[in-house]
Image: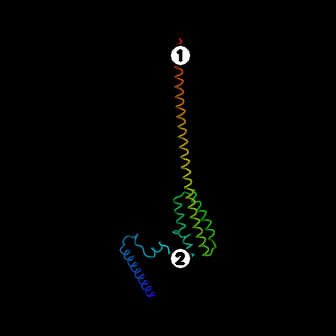
């Protein structure tokens, strides 16, 4: 009974595959746009093979060397987003060089381990950079708030000194008026 179910499932999957192939062929046969008029082999080149069925060597080569591989995609995005002097770009470049050197003269299973370690290090670099950027931003905000508070205190002190000068001038004027009144009364 189990074998029969497996056979029926295999037949169903085969039918689904044929239907999808026919549908894809129909879509491309109706296409008059030269951009969309692409054959199946070209389409397959755009989609990487599932990782589980790739050999270790192909997997490592795809990740490190292929223009659409993980490492090259990561670096193209970083290069677009961060100028050359940024910390993140430096961290990732140093990690790439370090692990690229480790990959030379390695057998495929070791290369897969090195690639895994490199990906984990890339992840750590990105997370460390995000933590650093967040701390820097918080520190900049604190510094900005401290500067605003200092300016407010200085302004308040200047206003207080001005008020004291005005009240001192007013009291001096009152004293001079009192003295003037007393001198005019005595004469």
Return the x and y of residue 83 as percentages of the image width and height.
54, 57
Placement of 37 over or under 85, stated as above or below: below
* Residue at the far top in the pictured view: 187
The residue drawn where x is 62% and y is 75% is 107
Return the x and y of residue 144 as percentages of the image width and height.
54, 47
The colour scheme used here is rainbow
Mark 1–mark 2 CB contact (< 8 Å):
no
- How many neighbours does mark 1 have within 10 angstroms: few (below 14), some (14-19), or many (20 or more)? few
| Of the image marks 1 and 2, the number of the one nearer the N terminus | 2
The residue drawn where x is 47% and y is 72% is 47
Front one among 148 and 76: 148
Return the x and y of residue 147 as percentages of the image width and height.
55, 44
Q: What element does badge 2 sit on?
A: loop
Return the x and y of residue 137 as percentages of the image width and height.
54, 53
32 sits left or right of 60 in the view? left
Q: Quadrant of the N terminus?
A: bottom left
123 sits left or right of 40 in the view? right
- Which circle marks residue 32 in the picture? none
- How many neighbours does mark 2 have within 10 angstroms: few (below 14), some (14-19), or many (20 or more)? few
In the picture of the structure, the residue carrying the numbered disc 2 is: 54
Q: How many marks?
A: 2
The residue drawn where x is 40% and y is 71% is 36
Placement of 6 over or under 163, stated as above or below: below
Of discs 1 and 2, which sits in the foreground?
Answer: 1
Distance (Cα) linking label 1 and label 2:
110 Å
In the picture of the structure, the residue carrying the numbered disc 1 is: 182
């Amino acid at each position: 009974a189990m074998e029969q179910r497996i056979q029926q499932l295999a037949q169903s999957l085969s039918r689904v595959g044929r239907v999808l192939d026919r549908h894809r062929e129909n879509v491309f046969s109706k296409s008059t746009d030269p951009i969309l008029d692409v054959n199946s082999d070209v389409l397959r080149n755009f989609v990487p093979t599932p990782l589980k069925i790739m050999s270790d060597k192909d997997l490592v080569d795809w990740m490190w060397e292929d223009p659409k591989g993980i490492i090259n995609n990561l670096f193209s995005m970083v290069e677009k987003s961060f100028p050359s002097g940024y910390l993140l770009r430096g961290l990732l470049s140093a990690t790439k060089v370090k692990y690229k050197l480790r990959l030379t003269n390695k057998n495929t299973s070791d290369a897969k381990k090195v690639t895994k370690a490199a990906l984990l290090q890339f992840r750590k670099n990105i997370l460390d950079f995000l933590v650093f950027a967040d701390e820097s931003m918080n520190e900049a905000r604190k510094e900005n708030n401290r500067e605003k508070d200092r300016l407010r205190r200085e302004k308040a002190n200047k206003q207080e000194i001005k008020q004291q000068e005005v009240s001192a001038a007013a009291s001096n004027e009152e004293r001079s008026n009192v003295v003037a009144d007393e001198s005019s009364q005595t004469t």
